[in-house]
Image: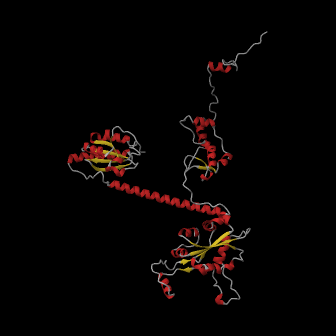
Amino acid sequence: MARKGQVSIQDNVENDEEFEAYLQAHIHQLICMEVYSEFCGPCLAAGNAIRKGKLEIGQENIAMVKALADNIDALSRFKNKSEPVFLFIVEGKLTRAMFGANGIDLCRIIEEEIGLLLREKQTGVKRRKQDISEMLPEESAKIEADRKLEQESREAEERLRILTLAARKKRVAERLTPHVALLNFIMFWPHCHQAHYDLYEKWDPLNLSVGAKDEIQLTEEDAKELLYMSDVEPNEACIHALLKGEALLVLFKMMEGDFRNFVRLMRHALYEEIPVPKEDEPPEKQLPPIPAYERYATISKSAREVRRDRYNARMEKLGEEYIPPGGLFVPGFYSPSNDLAKSNALKHFYPKVVSQLTSIESEHLPPHVLVMFHIDKRHDVKEIMTLYPDEMLSVGVFVGDDIHTAEHLAYSIKQYDTLDRPRRHLPLLQLAGLNPCYISSDVASGERDCLTLFPVGYGDDFEEEESIVEEEEKAQPAGDGEGDAPKEEDED
């Protein structure tokens, strides 16, 4: 909106000396000072309002001036801002400020300020003014409003970023799921490695094999990837126990051609199955009749209980070590509850294994921009895309000029070229190029428009009268024109 331009009724000051001299020269007038930055220039949109404010409203009682904030110390707070600012100055002091290019508001404020100036001269009662270098209340309110809008904008962008990243993450997991159908895992908490060996006899009857076994010191980021879309409540005690030492991660595999649902199979074995009593074991050695998941889960102890246990065990005092709240559920192990959770964790913890099955996509895209072309240039665009295939994230063909309302037609140029679409009407395009005063918005409205002006039977009895010249030209045989080549005659 604001850019460089010349308004003849405005003076111009560009440095401190000119600024101070102008204030002294117009000490008895109202000064309407438009403050601008060099990079964008004065506002052209307010030109008519400035002209009206000087010639019709203020006349000899007002002085209009443009001030370059970049070189004037008193106006330094307005540097590098593109929004128009109008300061109203009386006797070298600031009385009011207006932000924006609203011409109606500018004229209204000029009229009000002129009235207040004349009243001061008549009554001798001075109103409150302040130094130009100080901010007016409306300036502070504007800064606070701008700050709030900027904060809301940042928050909206962050929400959009998080939602977009979540959508991409889910899409990557969905596309990966069919390729890792024969893989699954169990993560054992650092305090519960023994559970892996206690449960080992479960896997042979299920025809499962161990593909890898790793002890990993997890980070908070690892924990987020592990528990993505899981049914584990990531409370303080749960995460603290998970990160306190090295967790045990065990990868399991099914045989080729095994079409069982690996997630349901593992969850049933660990979370639902009740152990069958062994006939050759005494009662005290029998496993309790609860699923393995419940058998190895614990409830976090309070700080008092932890200190008492350490005292009874003759262990050193904890000192300043963090103790999570008591009474929270802490699992002993975790196996994913759905395919998306499984795929995401496998991608994060076993990228080499997964990459042997399929390429791994990332939900994090490089910085990118949108570039649009008219459909007539599609083959030129296709040539460039062929040269840089790794630089192109997505391509599509859409109808419409607004990206928010455009309708999708095709996923590729090749698909678009094979579509059964209506051909362009060349006469209509040529007529539209003559800038008509009216054209129907679509064929349905065109049908109605044409019936309005050209009802059925329109022009049936009309015959165009031709002039004598037109009749002679119409009757003239082909080949008798002046441009015809002369015929040659054979000599006897």
Q: Nearer the viewer, residue 120 or 302?
A: 302
How are the colours assigned in the image?
secondary structure
* Residue at the right extreme, as displayed: 492
Residue appearing at x 54%, y 77% in the figure: 329
Q: Quadrant of residue 197?
A: bottom right
* Residue at the left extreme, as displayed: 124
Q: Nearer the viewer, residue 131 or 478?
A: 131
Q: In this rendering, would 28 be left or right of 33?
A: left
Rendered view: 63 above or below 405: above
Rendered view: 303 above or below 441: below
Residue appearing at x 54%, y 70% in the figure: 219
Q: In this rendering, would 292 be left or right of 79?
A: right
User: Where residue 479 sits: x, y (%)?
Assistant: 70, 19
Figure quadrant of the C terminus = top right
Rendered view: 234 above or below 115: below
Figure quadrant of the N terminus = top left
Q: Is residue 453 visible?
A: no
User: Where residue 175 sits: x, y (%)?
Assistant: 64, 61
Instruction: State the count of labels.
Output: 0
Q: Nearer the viewer, residue 321 or 126?
A: 321
Q: Quadrant of residue 48?
A: top left
User: Where residue 392 sits: x, y (%)?
Assistant: 60, 52
User: Where residue 195 sits: x, y (%)?
Assistant: 62, 79
Q: Quadrant of residue 47?
A: top left
Q: Is residue 115 visible?
A: yes
